[in-house]
Every structure is written in structure tokens, then in C-alpha cells.
Image (cartoon, rainbow, N blue to C red):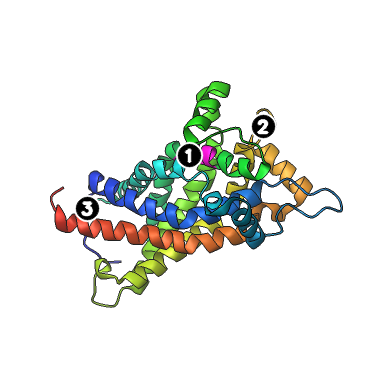
Amino acid sequence: MADEVKPISPLKNLLAGGFGGMCLVFVGHPLDTVKVRLQTQPPSLPGQPPMYSGTFDCFRKTLMREGIRGLYRGMAAPIVGVTPMFAVCFFGFGLGKKLQQKHPEDVLSYPQIFAAGMLSGVFTTGIMTPGERIKCLLQIQASSGETKYTGPLDCAKKLYKEAGIRGIYKGTVLTLMRDVPASGMYFMTYEWLKNIFTPEGKSVNELSVPRILVAGGFAGIFNWAVAIPPDVLKSRFQTAPPGKYPNGFRDVLRELIRDEGITSLYKGFNAVMIRAFPANAACFLGFEVAMKFLNWAVPNL
């Protein structure tokens, strides 16, 4: 795990993390729409087929009924949030590493990298929660046939009018439950694979593009393997009518297991995993490319 330790630059993290985040959203949003619609579709009536039989059926029906724009519905909210969110995410990870070092040259163990990643999940929750809330509501309204919100800003205004800031931040605890352990797994996996893929005698900073893509893609898969159950609960909770789950995620969990079984916690698994590799490969490649450019163009920034 030997590598040159560089000082944290918040501005470089802002720019590179924002670019990586935009790459992730653009590549991954269509399957994120599919995931949310699968997770929030109502149980089918006896003798009736479900609204969507699976990932590819949902993708096909969305594309046929709404066109390519349907797959990118709700993307404005995450796009607006990705620059500060990924800046905070990567900065939080770097800060988490720095806090555990007694000296700048100290090499961290993988559990310490996991802990640094968990800190980044705490940092990003404040930005992620309202973006996820708005995104989920916009993604499901098209499939339900109801048009309550004309766009992200209209959705935010109506949520604030109905329930204040609590309405916008509905699902904060579940977002923390999802992102804290998942972010730890995300960064630990990426650092682990980068070290495995680095030839002996070479620096991690010299890793080739294909190897960065593979490391980033598998980091995304491991991230979502941890995140899917709380993500299912979060999607259901954030899109539920006010007052449906007075006890929060415990009511959601109880209802899901009672009505649909334990496997319901892995709704959207195929869509998530199909999306995870290319989206997170694009994110880390975007981040690494942007950081290299910034280090070359403005080394003292």
C-alpha cells in the first residue's frame, strides 16, 4: 500500500469529485430509475401480474411509454447535488485518512481506510437526503400516471410547503444507515483493488485506465451489496404518503417482510448491479483524470 502521501486540497477535491459525480449520474441514472420503480411498485393483486416482472421488463416499458427522457427522469436533482456531494465525499475520505495518521507518511490498514470511508458517508448525508427524496418522487410519479410535480424545484417547494424542512429531509436516518457502511466498503474496495492491480515497483498513481475502471466498477458492486437493503427501505419510506409509517423504517421493514418476504429487501438487485459497475467505473475514472489534470495544470492550488 506504499504510495506518496499528498496534502488534501479541498478545491481540487471539489472540482475532481464533482466531475466524477457527474460522470456517475450520466452513466448510471437510467438504471437508477428502473431500480426505484421496481422497489416502489405496489404488490400485485391476486391473479394479476405485477406492474414490472423484472429489470429488463421495467426498462423496456419505461423506454416504450416515455422514451429516453423517461429513463433520465429526475436526473436534475442528483446532477445539482453531485458536485458538492462528491466534493464532500472525497474530501471526507481524505480527512478521515488524515485524522488517523500520526505522520503524513503513515500507511493505513484496510480497516482504517474503511473507517475513513464511513466518515465520508456521514458527511454526504446532508446533501444526499433531499436529492434522493426529490429524485425518488419524480421517478415514481411518471409510472403512477399522476403528475404532482413539474420538476425538482417544484417538488422541493411543495415538500417544504407541506411539511417544512422535515419533509425535504425525510429519510435521513435510512440514508445514514445506507451510506455510512456502504461508503466504507466503497473506498476500501477501491484502494484494495488499486494496490492489487499496481505492478511491483510502480506507483498507484501510474495505474492504467482499464485497471482504474475495473477497480472503480467492483468498488461500486461491493458498495451496493452492502447498501441495497437500507436503500429499499429508504425508497419506500421517502415515497410513502405522510403518516403511513409513524415509526419510521421499522414500520417499513415490518410491512415489507410481512407482505413480500425477506427477498423484498433485495428488490431492484439486478438493476443496481448492472448499473453499479459502469457508473462507478466512470466516477473513479473521472475523478482520477480530473485530479491528474489539476495536479498538472495548477500544482499549487
User: Amino acid under label 3?
Assistant: His
Q: Which mark is residue 131?
A: 1
Q: CA distance from mark 3 to mark 1?
A: 37 Å
> Which element carries disc 1, helix, strand or loop?
helix
Q: Are marks 3 and 1 in contact (CB under 8 Å)?
A: no
Q: What range is drawn magenta here?
A: 128-135
Percent of width and height locating residue 173: 54, 37
> Which element carries disc 2, helix, strand or loop?
loop
- Viewer-nearest of discs 3 and 2: 2
| Quadrant of the rendered image containing residue 55 | bottom right
Q: Can residue 54 be seen in the rendering of this structure?
A: yes
Identified at 65% across, 54% down, the residue is 267
User: Amino acid under label 2?
Assistant: Pro
Identified at 68% across, 33% down, the residue is 245
> Which element carries disc 3, helix, strand or loop?
loop
Percent of width and height locating residue 137: 58, 39
User: Amino acid under label 1?
Assistant: Gly
**Left or right: where does residue 237 sit relative to residue 190?**
right
Assess disc 1: are there few (<14), some (14-19) or many (≥20) residues with their C-alpha within 10 Å of its C-alpha. many
Identified at 45% across, 59% down, the residue is 279
In the image shown, does 79 or 199 lie closer to the viewer? 79
Q: Give the residue pinned by disc 2.
A: 241
**Left or right: where does residue 146 sit relative to residue 158?**
right
Is residue 166 a member of the stretch shown in magenta? Answer: no
Q: Can residue 108 be seen in the rendering of this structure?
A: no
Percent of width and height locating residue 290: 26, 56
In the image shown, does 70 or 289 lie closer to the viewer? 70
Q: Quadrant of the N terminus?
A: bottom left
Q: Give the residue pinned by disc 3.
A: 103
> Which badge, 3 or 2, comes first in the chain's sequence?
3
Q: CA distance from mark 3 to mark 2?
A: 51 Å
What secondary structure do most residues of the magenta stretch adopt? helix
